[in-house]
Image (tube, rainbow, N blue to C red):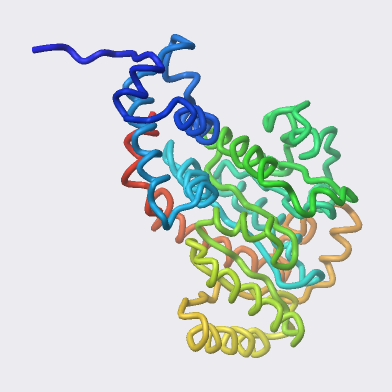
Amino acid sequence: MERKKEFYTLEEVCCALGLEKSRLRFVEREFGGFFGFSRLSPFPSLYSRKQLKIFAKINHLLDRPDLSVAKIKEEFHHLCLERGKGVFVIAVASGKGGVGKTSLSVNLSVLLARHGLRTVLFDADFGLANDHVFLGVNPKRTIVDLLKGIASIEEILVEGPSGLKLIPGASGVQQLTEMKTSQQDLLVEEMVRLRKMTDVLVIDSSAGVSRNVLRFLGLADEVVAVTTPNIAATLDVFGLLRIAARQQVKGYLNLVVNRVRNDVDADEVHTNIARCSDQFLGKRVERLGRVFEDAAMERAIQQRTPLVDFSPGGPAVLCLEEIVEKLLEKKKRWNGGSKNKLYDLFAPLTAG
């Protein structure tokens, strides 16, 4: 019985798959980074059997009329976050600014880290990043250094309270507000490198529904939408949820009502959003919790200290702890990432 070859030349790969060299080079250039091509073969000019299988799978997908190159890449990004036992991804978003999205992201992250989870907080509010202020840390490098190629993601990480790690954003950098696709690809690929040292990734996204925001919501296992009882904020967060549903975001949609005076105010917002979601979105929005108005929050910000450290036992912190307990329960039920339609094809190829 003839033994299968371990390595193949470019010409042999083209012959085996019936592809032109230009097509093969295109696949390698566009998708090679997802599968660590440089590590799959010890010979720069030869291709392994595993690479051959990957080429064949991708070429098959490229022939499908319902899948564009961009869509396949998007699916791969999500798959990369699932492999290696995966990272539980929480994306925090809001329809408008000023509803307490950042304070919620920061304090939930600190509490998750206290529960012993290796937690990374990603300040993805590009252009107006200030998570470091809430945490009381002073980053020497930011996401800008990573995108310029002068620092790796490990080099820009900053340690915060309770062992929390922060990926610092940048403030006042307009070009970050609408990143190029190539920059988004680089960022997600770098984030994937953290998967072996991360249990939970919390993404503090920008307010609104920019392409950046929708890209990060698409990576999440749990989307946490933040609003207040203010009618404008409520309408805006429903707009965010509606667009997320239309974009077929894979993660579960959740709602947190912030700065409420009492449970009645929170219940009214939750009920209205749930009713509208059932009627118009066809996707359930879960009631994750509410956070009471707390005067200590502003003092904590001025002191550059997370509220959970500044006022433990306060009314807002007790609410935050209830929300974290629900997220921990969700993580227990989580099976390593929602399996997208490419998972069955590529999970065996990307394992290890």
Q: Count the marks: how many?
A: 0
Quadrant, the C terminus: top left
Looking at the image, which residue is at 53% across and 49% down?
A: 74
Looking at the image, which residue is at 87% across and 48% down?
A: 173
Going by the picture, which residue comes out furthest to the top?
Answer: 43
Work out whether residue 75 or residue 205 is closer to the camera in this orientation and state it. Answer: 75
Q: Position of residue 284 (x, y in %)?
A: 47, 77
Quadrant, the N terminus: top left
Q: Position of residue 69 (x, y in %)?
A: 51, 47
Q: Position of residue 295 (x, y in %)?
A: 84, 72
Work out whether residue 238 or residue 105 is closer to the camera in this orientation and state it. Answer: 238
Q: Is 32 left or right of 273, judged from the image as shown?
A: left
Going by the picture, which residue comes out furthest to the front?
Answer: 20
Work out whether residue 248 or residue 290 is closer to the camera in this orientation and state it. Answer: 248
Question: Is 163 placed above or below 10 here?
Answer: below
The answer to which quarter of the image holds residue 232 is: bottom right
Q: Position of residue 223 (x, y in %)?
A: 57, 63
The answer to which quarter of the image holds residue 287 is: bottom right
Going by the picture, which residue comes out furthest to the left?
Answer: 1
Looking at the image, which residue is at 73% across and 37% down?
A: 159
Q: Is 238 left or right of 101, judged from the image as shown?
A: left
Work out whether residue 332 or residue 208 is closer to the camera in this orientation and state it. Answer: 208
Looking at the image, which residue is at 60% across and 66% down?
A: 224
